[in-house]
Image (tube, helix red, strand yellow):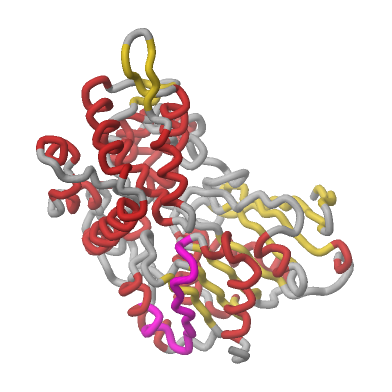
Amino acid sequence: MNSYRQPGLVLTDRHFTVPLDHTDPGGEQIEIFGREVVAGSRAGEELPWLLYLEGGPGFGARRFTGAEAWLGRAVKEFRVLLLDQRGTGLSSPANRQTLPLRGGPREQADYLAHFRSDSIVRDCELIRPQLTGGAPWTVLGQSFGGFCAVRYLSSAPEGLSTVLITGGLPALDAHADDVYRAAYPRIERKVAAYYARYPQDVERAREITAHLAEHRPESAGHRLTPEGFQSLGIMLGGGNGNHQLHYLLENAFVTTPHGTELSDTFQEAMRTANSFAGHPLYAVLHEAIYGQDERPTGWAAERVRAEFPQFDAEAALKGDGPVLFTGESIHPWHFDVDPALRPLRETAELVATRGDWEPLYDIERLAANEVPVAAAVYHDDMYVDTAHALRTAAAIRGLRTWVTDEFEHDGLRAGGPRVLDRLLALVRDEA
């Protein structure tokens, strides 16, 4: 272990060994990383533990600087473990550089089948007694981290003292098709609100799309395409996302000796926003997190998009309608344009066609839940369907919801201490 200080905090880097396949505990082992964080003034005290599970899939736990955001509130009463879920951050990272160690695409896909919430929760249950001495802990799950928390309630509630969920109540029995069939109308509403605020961007988006369709430029090996431009709509799910997208578009073009071109500034910003270099599992496993039976997810977002022709950029350019942005969805073309994903194209195809997913949630066990649970549900969350979330909330015995339009999906980041305070008050029956 390696301990060090930041302002107001003591941090300790911890490494754990867990089975790759929890059904074969004596088989191959992988390493999991977690960062323990405690207030400097309370470092020597016996404190209850709070496990933080990041959103994703595919993102390591946030790297905080000091007692900022919700972490500052949490360390007032908890010792916090910021966990890099398997395959992310420093936990046996899985990406285009490391996955070839497994073999070819088939071996890589089989390996990644062990990187869903069921395995993440079992990792947590092996780690917990090493830290708490066997005592249950509080789990705070953001977005996909909330999906993991609901899996935790389904499979190992004895390890939980309290569960707090922000923007992460999954549909318990929906196929990926159902998830995206609900998603596209939400995304369309977000785009309409964006264009209502910035009507000048309707024509600017059409101009950018037409330029990309004609020229197909590259930036650092990343192919910039109309579909990639549309996917910048993922920004619209955050509290300041519509402003960020507007500022990105406003300097899209420059005049050069060769005529009007996309600016280097815009191309770099679009490449950065579209790149999965830092979180490739988000792309490879995004639909697999919804797999629960023998039906393949089968590029659900791509197939379901055909039911919403208003998202067809080419058709929009032929007419006079706006180009609609997309968002929280992964498509086969991502693996053609992004150099961080290109080597994983066949692996992703095998994951998409896999048809032996195990159920993730135990509906009967959730209906008999005895763990105090509180969840922030954002009124028109672009990433997690509100109707699905509320149905799940009703299916988990004792779960208390805070339904709010004060924040978007990034409420835990934007609202920090206040969001955590509200959820703690709910589970303690103080609100």
- State whether residue 421 appears in this view: yes
State whether residue 118 appears in this view: no
Which sits in the foreground, 260 or 75?
A: 260
Say which quarter of the image contains residue 391. Answer: bottom left
Q: Residue furthest front?
A: 200
Q: Quadrant of residue 209?
A: top left
In the rendered image, residue 428, in percent from the top left (x then y), is placed at 62, 88
- Residue drawn at (39%, 65%) of the image: 381
Instruction: Report the residue that reaches farthest toward the top.
Output: 257
Q: Which residue occupies the foreground of this view, 188 or 228?
A: 188
Decide if residue 228 is on the left or right side of residue 132: left
Instruction: Relative to 255, say whether 202 is above or below.
Output: below
Extreme residue in the bottom direction: 429
Q: Which residues are magenta?
A: 392-409
Residue 231 as seen in the image, left or right of residue 355: right
**Residue lying at 34% horizontally and 63% vertically, measured from the top left:** 358
The C terminus lies in which quarter of the figure? bottom right
Whether residue 343 is situated above or below residue 418 in the rendered picture: above
Q: Residue at x 62, y 44 (%)?
A: 90
Please give the name of the residue rendered at 65% of the width and 69% of the height, measured from the top-left corner: 417
Q: In this rendering, would 31 be left or right of 195?
A: right
Please state the total of marks drawn on the protein image.
0
